[in-house]
Image (cartoon, rainbow, N blue to C red):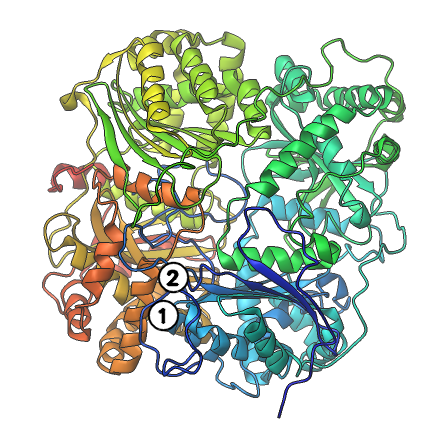
Amino acid sequence: MAAAAAAWRDDELVIKSPSDHRSYRLLRLPNGLCALLVHDPEIYPDGYPDPHASKPHEDEDMGEEDDEEEDGDEDDDDEEYSDEEGEDDEDDEGEEDEEDGSEPKRRKEKGSSEPLVKKAAAAMCVGMGSFADPPKAQGLAHFLEHMLFMGSSEFPDENEYDSYLSKHGGSSNAFTETEYTCYHFEVKREYLKGALDRFSQFFVSPLVKAEAMDREILAVDSEFNQVLQSDSCRLYQLQSHTCSQGHPLNRFTWGNKKSLVDAMGSGINLREEILQMYKTNYHGGMMKLVIIGGEPLDILESWTMELFSKVKGGPLLDMSPKTDMPFWRSGKLHRLEAVRDVHSLCLSWTLPCLHKEYMKKPEDYLAHLLGHEGKGSLLCFLKAKGWASSLSAGVGTDGTQRSSYAYIFEMSIRLTDSGLKNLYEVISAVYQYIKLLKQSEPQEWIFKELQDIGYMEFRFAEEQPPDDYAVDLAENMLYYSEKHIVSGEYIYEGWDPELVKHVLSFFHPDNMRVDVLSKSFDKQSQAIQCEPWFGAQYIEEDIPSSFMESWRNPAQIDDAFHLPRKNEFIPGDFNLRNANMPKPLSDDNPRCIVDEPFIKLWYKMDMTFNVPRANTYFLISVKDGYSNLENSVLTDLFVNLLKDELNEVLYQAYVAKLETSMSVVGSNLELKLYGYNDKLSTLLSSILAASQSFSPKSDRFEVIKEDLERAYKNTNMKPMSHSTYLRLQVLREIFWDVDEKLEVLMKLTFSDLVAYVPKLLSQLHIEGLCHGNLSEDEAMNISKIFQNTLSAQTLPDEARHEERVLCIPDDTNFVRSVRVKNELEENSVVEVYFPVEQDIGKDATKLRAITDLFSNIIEEPCFDQLRTKEQLGYTVDSSPRMTYRVLAYCFRVMSSKYSPVYLQSRIDSFIDGVSALLDGLDEETFEHHRSGLIADKLEKDPSLSYQTGDYWSQIVDKRYMFDMSKLEAEELRTVRKEDVISWYNTYIKPSSPKRRRLAIHVYGCNSDIAEAAKLKEQSWITIDDVKSLKKSSQFYSSLC
């Protein structure tokens, strides 16, 4: 049967960047569904193949070449060999979890004689989210999102969608916002039609099987338990809990077992409620679809009509502002007990819904001023007083802060101990600065700066991975007019000072909510209340009326406050250095242009992305910076104090999209400058001059020391990070324990640091990479800036720290069992690490390739068995690891329900079954996995930053194999199923005499660590003393 014709289409309406090579078509279907089709010519760089040729483009037998990724389910990390965790929102400063560099790497490479290709992707936003939850079944919208993955009439197998994507180099995910729910996937380019066929059924005929509901309630519960100890989530829920009764925000949006099972217990038929929610809201009028493919727009349109015309029709989504309703009672202060050691002041003002003002962005103008960090700013004043260490301000991007009910402007101030004591004085300073803004006319030149930066970002936008871009566009379709779907977030048009004044008028104490999140909490207070879902303790206080009155109209404005100066870092030179250079036949690799005792510099001019950006990364080896415990702490202090000293300059550059990162990576300092290249050398000169003449100040020393103390105390508060930390603590020969670092820190004095810094910087060695829109002369000049600015001597080879990794003996099983650091943390983690070989020699490339292919084959079955079927926990993953050039394979499970001993037994059971899984793998399925991985290795980097990250990891690892993924792809062509089975039989199979294991067991508060004794009966060797183990162990030779 022929598909219905589109009700409306337009190929010219969407405004795109001059540098955007994609084509866009807007489509409205008769059922009301609005689609944006994106033709990306780089997906098929040699042209779209003849659809009548023998090669199909749907689901059947395509074991050929081209695209992406092993990840069949959750979008954990896009890293091939990585131990970066990226768990929830709070950063784990001071964590020792760096391995194989710190840059996100996407598994693909350059320099291939074959075309580099991209994935296809799609996203669907449905205009209904958690605000639609019925009061008696909170979390229902989130639960519905989970249930749509559990099979459809057309594809009834629960695992069909994920299995199809996993087999064909794809991945998927979904999330529930307050007013919409978004589903998205990416897939190897030839399989877009087949993926869309399965995806479309989410919105046509999901089964919502009764037998799957109990299991998915557990999945929702596990997901909630992951954030149970997150301070930011606890604060959000307190704000929801204390919101006005009847307001949509006044609910529990995550959902958990209690909220959903209690609903059933009170007589609610949960399946009927879900089906009713689906029936009411999942119709064409509520849906915004984005498809990104390499096919011509006409083909993408025909697929859209064929598959999505089956969605039932309904009235068009209305995102217009809702009834004005107060969120919170004014004049109240909420003190929330923090999990981490932190003092955070959060001020919130409700503004009218500003959806229709997206071109004028008055809230962003005010965020720029209130969140500024330069001279005359609020933060500068608070730091000078010793009251704060950081500040952020603005309307966030999440659905709570940008709903059709109101915008919520938040200011978050990280307080010092002194700032907490002077809390009301801090708020007084905020209102002095607000008064300055109200007294000063809105400044058009400031708006013009933001406008210039916005247009610059639009014109030279770095391309995102296709699935991320699809999600962004689908979300934009909800809020921006059709022509601004691509450009809306960048636009500053129509200077409207009266609108700025109007929005600023809402910044008064009677429209302000005050939350203080702190570990310093009066546990003896009679006024303690308990938020019911997270169990967080809080106290509600009245703010003294005298303060409220003084904030309404501050008596004076401190002389230190003034508006920011003009930004000298806004670039003016956008000329491309490669403009007159011939296009190379293949993408060249970085080459070494300076190789001197003091500095070694790698260089590559960008010939691919054609943007006026550059990334310059430097690894700085310092004298004795990691040679003992005290020095490692002093090095941390030095870097943090230097960043503090440079903050005003670095912030101005950051606003102009030239960013800086300074950190301690292992035993080295790592300096990165990245962004628009015009002022990059100027910024580098400022940083190096400041470090050369650096003289610490005693008052800032005390503040930064307090900050570092908190960072050390907060390390390992998250169980997943903790397990990685514990594994690295065992594996790395030299590893300074964070608790010991904290003890040392408490004894260090200002004079200790003053004496240390000259020694630290007396001898250096620098290895760097300049990549992007820089000529070779400009790169050479960057090396001269180092040589001319820094007066250090060369650090000799033998004085440079070398990383050595523990060599676990064959047929040895080590286990380390530790309690969670946070005594209220319910989640346990098991991480089982199987060393393979050191990454060196002629067979290393093949070994990496086979390891990746093994991962590609088992990742989805592992997830399906341990999470979907057994419901062990929300986080289940299996993937390769590379620890300072030692290749390994790792299984991880986090669970709030089961003990580590039980989790270990279930991982062991799955591993036992892998033998049969591999034996039973037919050649066609094996070929799908192999060809998908080959394509993954040859996938084109989405942007300059990703490519730089790949190059940099090779330099940090001292491997210098810049075409590593190409070589792995070539090896994969010769890999047979028998090779994977042999690899498994050698390194993973229980009966192998070569198998080695290191298991890390982190016990949550619900599990009894006494159970660990059972493991001794199972040939496990318990690690009680890591230092003693290392004294009696062998280590691999150092490669990096």
What label sits on residue 877 in the rendered view? Answer: 2
Looking at the picture, does residue 1002 appear above or below residue 142? above
Q: Give the image location of residue 337, x and y in percent.
A: 63, 39
Q: Give the image location of residue 387, x and y in percent.
A: 64, 19
Horizontally, is 782 left or right of 381 in the view?
left
Asked if labels 2 and 1 touch by Cβ distance under 8 angstroms, the answer is yes
What label sits on residue 862 in the rendered view? Answer: 1
Q: Is residue 931 at least partly visible in the picture?
A: yes
Residue occupying image coordinates x 57% and y 69%: 297
Residue count near mark 2 (Cα–Cα under 10 Å), binned few <14, some 14–19, many ≥20: many
Q: Give the image location of residue 807, x and y in percent.
A: 14, 47
Residue occupying image coordinates x 49% and y 8%: 697
Q: Say which element carries label 1.
A: helix
Identity of the amino acid at label 2?
Asp
Residue occupying image coordinates x 53% and y 69%: 296
Q: To which quarter of the image does residue 626 belong?
A: top left
Residue occupying image coordinates x 43% and y 16%: 685
